[in-house]
Image: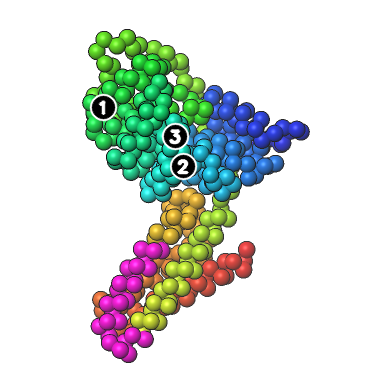
Amino acid sequence: MPAPMEPDTTPEEHRERALLLADLGRYDEAADEIAAGLTAAPREAGLLATLARIHLAADQPAEALAAAERAAVAEPGNLAVLVVRSMALTDSRRFADAAGVAAEILTGWPDDAYAQRTGAALLSESRNGQEALNAAWNGVRIAPTDAEAHLVLAVVAARLRLFDLAQRAYGEALELDPVIGDAGRDTGIVRFERRRWARAIEDLAEEASLGVPPGADIPAPGAFASPSPPVVVPAHPVLDVSGETTDAVGETARYGSGGTIVAAVLAAAMTLINVGISRVWAGFIGVLIFGAVVFWFRGRLPEPAGVVMRRLRSGDRRLAAAVYLTFAAPLFLLGYAVVGGPAPLVAGMVAGAVAELLVLAGRRRR
C-alpha cells in the first residue's frame, strides 16, 4: 500500500525519493513513493512519467503504458512524456504508434541534441530506416562531444546492418566516455535511455562484430562496473486501469455490433436489387468491420488484450461474451457472401443485438 502523504511533501520530493529508491533496485518502493505523490497530485505529469519509467525498468510494459498515457493527457507537449510514451508503446509492440510519437519528437525539437538522438533511437526501435539514421547523424552534429549521441548512431547503424559505421560510432562513444561500455548494467531510471541503448548495442554486438578501434586506450568492459543491486519489481500496479479497460471493451462491442447490424440490414435490402451484388458487398463490409473491430480493440486498451480477456472471463462473463459476439457477428456476413441465404444475415443481426444487450446490462449493473 502507498505510504500516506507527509505534510508539506511536494510531488517533486516524492519523485526524487523514487529516483533514489530506483537506483537501489527497489522498484517496488519507488512505485509506492510515486503512488503517495499521486494521492495529492493525480495528474502530475512528472510523477506519471517517472512511474512509467519504473515499470519499463521492471519489464512491465502494460503498466508503463497506462502511466505514460495518463502523463500524455496531463501534459501532451512534454518531451520527457513523449519519450517514455514511445518506449512504452514499443515495449507493448504497438510499433506504428511508437514510430508516430518518435517522429513527433524529431519534428518538434529539431535543434535539441537530446531530442534528436533519443528520437532517432526510438524511431529505429519501431521503424528503422534512413529517417532514423539522418536524425542520429543530426544528434551527433549538434553535440559531437556527447558520447550518448555516438552510441545512438551506433545502434541505429547496426540495426540497418551498417556495421562499419556502427563500429566507428561505438568506438567514438567509448573514447568520449569509457564507462558507457558498462551502461547496460546500470540500475535505476535516471539514465534509463542510456542503459536502453547500451543494452541494444550489446544485443547487436555479436552480429555487428563491434569492437574497440585499434590502438585506442579503452578499458575492458566491466572495468568500471560495480555489482548491481538485486532488483525488486512492483508487485501490483499503482494505477487502476480497470475502468478505462471496461469502457474500451464496451465501446468496441457497441460500435462493432452496431456496425454489423446496420451492414446486415443493408445487405438484406440489397437483395431486392441484386442478390450477387448484395453478397459481394456483404463479404467486403464484413472483412472491413472485422478488421476495424480488431484494430479498435487493440488500440483502445490500456493493457494487453490477453490479460483483459482472461480477467473478463473470470470476473465479467457478460462483457466477455459481448466481445466474442462482436468479433463473431461480422463473420456471419462473410458466411452470407459464401453460401447465401437469409440465415447468416439473421445470425449476424442476432449476434450483434445480443452483444449490445449484454453491454447495456453490464452498464446498468455498475
Residue 98 in sight from this viewpoint: no
Report the magenta residues as a range. 269-293
Image point (59%, 66%), residue name: 363
Mark 3 residue element: loop
Task: Look at mark 1 in the image and give the residue it sits on.
Answer: 165
Image point (30%, 74%), residue name: 283
Q: Position of residue 171 (x, y in %)?
A: 31, 19
Compare residues 213 and 292 and report the one nearer the observer. 213
Task: Look at mark 2 in the image and give the residue it sits on.
Answer: 108
The relative height of residue 220 versus residue 290 in the rendered view (above or below) is above
Image point (37%, 86%), residue name: 269
The relative height of residue 355 versus residue 42 in the rendered view (above or below) is below
Q: In terms of image quadrants, where is residue 207?
A: top left
Q: Position of residue 11 (x, y in %)?
A: 66, 35
Mark 1 residue element: helix
Report, in whole angstroms, how far the alpha carbon at label 2 lies from the one at label 3.
9 Å
